[in-house]
Amino acid sequence: MKVKVIKSSEGEALDIELEEDFLKANEKIANLNRKMFNRYNVKVFDIMGSIGSGKTTIIERLVEILKEKYRIGVIAGDTSTTIDAERISKYGVPSIQINTGKECHLDALMVRKAAKNLLRKNIDIIFIENVGNLICPADFPLGAHKRIVVVSVTEGEYMIKKKQDIFRVADIGVINKKDMAVYMGIDINSLVRDALEANPNIKVVVTSAKTGEGIRELINLLELKI
C-alpha cells in the first residue's frame, strides 16, 4: 500500500492508522460506485482469484453466452501486462486494462475511472477481473453487485482452508478446472464443504471453463437471464 512509504518516528503505529483510513476511503468510493452503477442500471461483478485459476477464461465463456442479449464491458486488472484485456477484446466487447504496478489489487477509485469510460457506451454488464491474488482484494470492495472468487483444483486441496478471508467476503465461489480433478487427486466435494465452512451464505458452483461445464449455472447465480 502507498502508506508504507511514509516515514515516521511512530513507525508501525502510524502505518496502521493510515492503512485504516485508506480502507475507509476505499469503502466510501465503493459506495459511490454502487450508486453510480445503479443510476445507470448496470450490473457489475468483481471476479477475484489467483493467477492461473481461470478468471479470464471464465469471463470469456460468460461473454460468449451473454453478448447476444447484453452489452458487456470488461475491466481487467494486472500489475503490468495487457494480456487479459487483449484476450477479451477479441470477443468484440470493450475492455479496459488497469495496470496497478506493485499493488496486488484493484481499488474503488481505479475502477471508478475505468467504469465511467464504459458507461458512456451504454453498457448493461461490467465484469471486473481483479489482479491475480487471493489475499489483497478481499479488503477492497469496488462497488460491485456481487463478488465472485475463483479457485482451481490445481491450486491444491487446502487452498480454500488457507484463504478463507476472501471466501467470507464473496457472494459466489467458483471451483474451476473440474476436468483436472481426477489427475490432481482432488475431492471436489471436500472443496465445496471448505467454501461453505468459510462462509455458510456463499453460493458455490463447480466449473470447467475449458469445456464450458457449469458456466450456465454460474450465470443463474449472477441472476442474469439468457
Image (cartoon, rainbow, N blue to C red):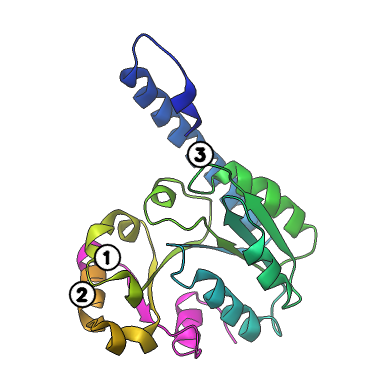
Residue in front for this viewpoint, 206 or 99: 99
Distance (Cα) linking label 2 and label 3: 32 Å
- Asked whether the viewer can see residue 98, the reply is yes
Q: Which label lies toward us, 2 or 1? A: 1
- Measuring from the top left, give residue 190's x and y in whole percent: 20, 78
Residue in front for this viewpoint, 140 or 58: 58
Helix, strand or loop at label 2? It is helix
Q: Is residue 52 magenta?
A: no
- The outermost residue toward the right is 121
Residue underneath mark 1: 160
Mark 2, residues whose alpha carbon is within 10 Å: few (<14), some, or many (≥20)?
A: some
| C-beta proximity under 8 Å, tags 2 and 1 | no
- Measuring from the top left, give residue 18's x and y in whole percent: 42, 24
The disc, 2 or 3, on the residue closer to the chain's N-terminal end is 3
Would you say 207 lies left or right of 199 here? right
Q: Quadrant of residue 198?
A: bottom left
Helix, strand or loop at label 3? It is helix
Helix, strand or loop at label 1? It is helix
Would you say 110 lies left or right of 172 here? right
Q: Quadrant of residue 11?
A: top left
**Amino acid type, residue under disc 1 in the picture:** Ile
Residue underneath mark 2: 193
Would you say 124 lies left or right of 164 here? right
Residue 12 drawn above or below residue 54? above
Q: Is residue 218 magenta?
A: yes
- Measuring from the top left, give residue 122's x and y in whole percent: 77, 65
Residue underneath mark 3: 26
Residue 219 drawn above or below residue 35? below
Q: Which residues are magenta?
A: 197-226
Distance (Cα) linking label 2 and label 1: 10 Å
